[in-house]
Image (cartoon, rainbow, N blue to C red):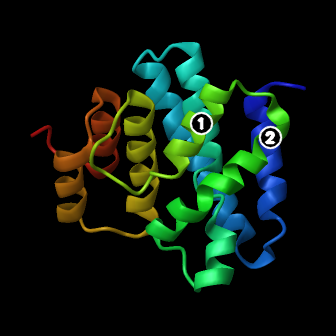
């Protein structure tokens, strides 16, 4: 198999192409989240295994969205978390990942809308990367963005990116 990350990206684009009416949005969203996750992880000095785990989780983090639209009529975060774990496990089945790494990827995908009890830097960065993208896509107010930053963001890189994107003071 080629590089796991590039292969996962191509596979996820193909996965989303099955849902034509939101294919471009879902594809662009996961690519932006992956890009931020990759950059934050590298800037924060993650070891290669944790970096790969983070990036593979970021690529698949919204894998449940098509199913949630069909099954529930929306992509509520709690539904994504519930449905995402088995879909992620199946998606990465052919990757020959160590069980521990696959379990961690599934855990992050299954908790990427849960902001308390964060148990690792990979999970923390996933939350930050997803918020960096969602804050723009959802056109959140500056007050909401600042509040989320102050309550959830922990990495120096994530905080700096958010502050730079929204011209926020380093408070």
Q: Is residue 73 above or below residue 96?
A: below
Q: Is residue 70 above or below residue 150?
A: below
Residue at numbered disc 1: 103
Give the label on residue 68, or none.
none
Image check: 108 left or right of 59?
left
Q: Residue furthest left?
A: 171
Label 1 SS = helix
Which residue is nearer to you in this view: 61 or 87?
87
Residue at image coords 67%, 55%: 86
CA–CA distance between discs 1 and 2?
Answer: 11 Å
Q: Position of residue 112 (x, y in %)?
A: 45, 51
Q: Position of residue 94 (x, y in %)?
A: 85, 37
Q: Is residue 168 visible?
A: no
Q: Is residue 63 above or below residue 69?
A: above
Image check: 14 left or right of 118?
right
Quick one: quadrant of the C terminus?
top left
Label 2 SS = helix
Residue at numbered disc 2: 93
Mark 2 crowd level (few <14, some 14–19, many ≥20, 10 Å Cα)? few
Choose top left, top right, bottom left or bottom right for residue 57: top right
Residue at image coords 80%, 28%: 96
Residue at image coords 75%, 79%: 21
Image check: 40 left or right of 69?
left
Quick one: quadrant of the N terminus?
top right
Q: Is residue 117 visible?
A: yes
Q: Position of residue 50 (x, y in %)?
A: 53, 22
Q: Position of residue 153 (x, y in %)?
A: 27, 41
Q: Is residue 36 above or below residue 44?
A: below
Q: Residue furthest right?
A: 1
Residue at image coords 54%, 74%: 75
Q: Residue furthest front?
A: 99
Mark 1 crowd level (few <14, some 14–19, many ≥20, 10 Å Cα)? some
């Amino acid at each position: 198999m080629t590089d796991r990350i590039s292969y996962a990206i191509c596979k996820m684009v193909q996965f989303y192409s099955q849902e034509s009416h939101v294919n471009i949005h879902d594809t662009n969203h996961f690519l932006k989240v992956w890009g931020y996750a990759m950059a934050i992880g590298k800037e924060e000095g993650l070891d290669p295994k944790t970096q790969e785990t983070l990036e593979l989780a970021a690529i698949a983090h919204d894998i449940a969205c098509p199913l949630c639209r069909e099954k529930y009529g929306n992509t509520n975060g709690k539904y994504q978390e519930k449905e995402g774990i088995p879909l992620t496990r199946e998606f990465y089945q052919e990757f020959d990942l160590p069980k521990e790494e696959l379990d961690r990827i599934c855990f992050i995908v299954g908790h990427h809308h849960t902001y308390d009890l964060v148990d690792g830097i990979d999970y923390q960065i996933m939350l930050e990367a997803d918020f960096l993208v969602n804050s723009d896509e959802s056109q959140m107010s500056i007050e909401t963005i600042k509040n989320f930053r102050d309550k959830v963001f922990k990495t120096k890189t994530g905080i700096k990116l958010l502050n730079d994107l929204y011209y926020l003071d380093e408070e």
